[in-house]
Image: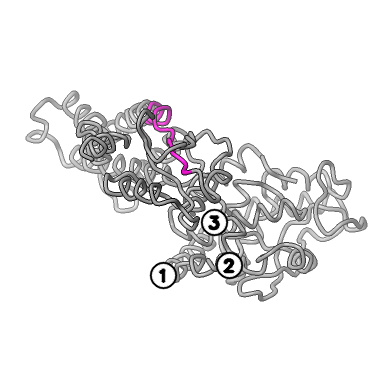
Amino acid sequence: MKEVSSTMEHQRRYSRHYERLLASKRLQTFFGVLLVVVLPAMYRWGFDFWNTSTLAQWNAILGTAAAFTLSLTLINRLCQLPGTRSFTYVIPTVAASYTLLIIICGVLEIEVSRLQVGISFVLAIVFGGAFYYVDSKLTTKRMAVVPFGKAPSLCDHHSKSVYWYQLEAPSLAGMKRIDAVVADLRADLPEEWQRFLADCTIHRIPVYHATQAHEMITGKVLLDHLYANEFGSLTPREDYEVIKRGMDILAALILIPLLAPVMLLTALAIRLDSPGKALFCQPRMGFHCRPFTVYKFRSMYTDMKGTGFTQEGNDPRITRVGRFIRKCRLDELPQLFNVLKGDMSMIGPRPESMSLTEWYEKDVPFFHYRHVVRPGITGWAQVEQGYAAEVEGMIEKLEYDFYYIKNFSFWLDVLIIVRTIKTVIFGSGAR
């Protein structure tokens, strides 16, 4: 028994003391601040800079330390979500954190050493990029799968973020060290496998239910998960819902004046390109199944009829200007007024037309439940999957929507915003 216990202690990755220290986020932040903030100050102002620094220099030191810590915190939190690679978020998060520092100093009229801020910013990009690039290459998850119930079928898909190891016996001996064990905890497990899972827990090797692991990796909630009376787990957090509504109103009040010139130019281009109104209004199903009128810039000819959704490929109904504004997502800008009215949120499941809603409710299980939160201008399904209108695509889209509802949080919204910006820049996923 002692021999088995000793083996189990070292089967979890980062179980050794020095590995725990190297993996410690606090320690990484501490050494990062030394490299990015303290060393540049020592190089520029000497080893006793704390005795000779001016107020502007001290403001720069403290401000850059806060900005760097914030950027690492953002990266680490975002990387806990499905399908994320820490390296890809270094530049946007560091840039956003240091930009926030400059804005705060400007608004409050705080004097700072701009050169120190600039040097710290460059070093933060270099340090963060190098560290997280190596980290992303070395930290692909290793999951051992118990061969009973749904676990083998849910854990056999290919993914860049995880290696699956199918267990043949209730033991981790002879295997590479793993991050967790995955099992169908509702299956009828033999007694020796139950003891194995208990030993894993005792030795701090995480044991995940198969559907939980599937959600962590894919970012989707399986529909058969709902058949198992899991509606309670999909109830969104009401406290964050209130905070989110306040952030939506603030964002709309800021963005509408800023984007007003872009919206005016877009409306003018639409009118010059084809006859008809610049604005397209359509009834859609919204929050708590209440219909509302969505506002969009018109991207189609008014005298051409077709299906109730955009056809894949080159839909002949789309105008020249319409094709451009769809690719850049400019057609969605009027929905900021829907956000201000309370019909929509900045982030949430996309609202569907009334005709499509009636169709999906007949053929897609639990489609109705997506209206438990406000629909959004962008959402988790949009950044993960893109456009979907057919029933098969809508089922997958619904699984992404349910994941968003179940994991309704500030950090998931931040990730969606970052990916939406990437989508707008590269124009992917449009139809």
The N terminus lies in quadrant: top left
Please give left or right for residue 58 compared with residue 140 in the image. left
Task: Inspect this view and state whether residue 220 appears.
Answer: yes
* Type of amino acid under label 3: Tyr
Mark 2 vs mark 1, CA separation in Å: 15 Å
**Within-10-Å neighbours for mark 2: few <14, some 14–19, many 20+:** many
Q: Position of residue 182 (x, y in %)?
A: 45, 46
The one of 334 and 129 positioned closer to us in this rendering: 129
Residue position for label 2: 374
Q: Where is 232 relative to 400, above or below?
A: below
The one of 17 and 125 positioned closer to us in this rendering: 17
* Type of amino acid under label 1: Asp
Task: Inspect this view and state whether residue 417 appears.
Answer: no
Counting residues from the N terminus, which is met first, the one under dot 2 or under dot 3?
Answer: 2
* Quadrant of residue 50 within the rendered picture: top left
Residue position for label 1: 239
Q: Where is 409 relative to 103, above or below?
A: below
Q: Residue at x 39, y 28 (%)?
A: 138
Q: Residue at x 59, y 58 (%)?
A: 401
Q: Position of residue 390 (x, y in %)?
A: 77, 53
Query: What is the secondary structure assignment of the residue under circle 3?
Result: helix
* Type of amino acid under label 2: Arg
Task: Report if residue 140 lies within the magenta region.
Answer: yes
Residue position for label 3: 403
Task: Report if residue 176 lies within the magenta region.
Answer: no
Numbered disc in front, either 2 or 3: 3
Please give left or right for residue 229 compared with residue 23 in the image. right
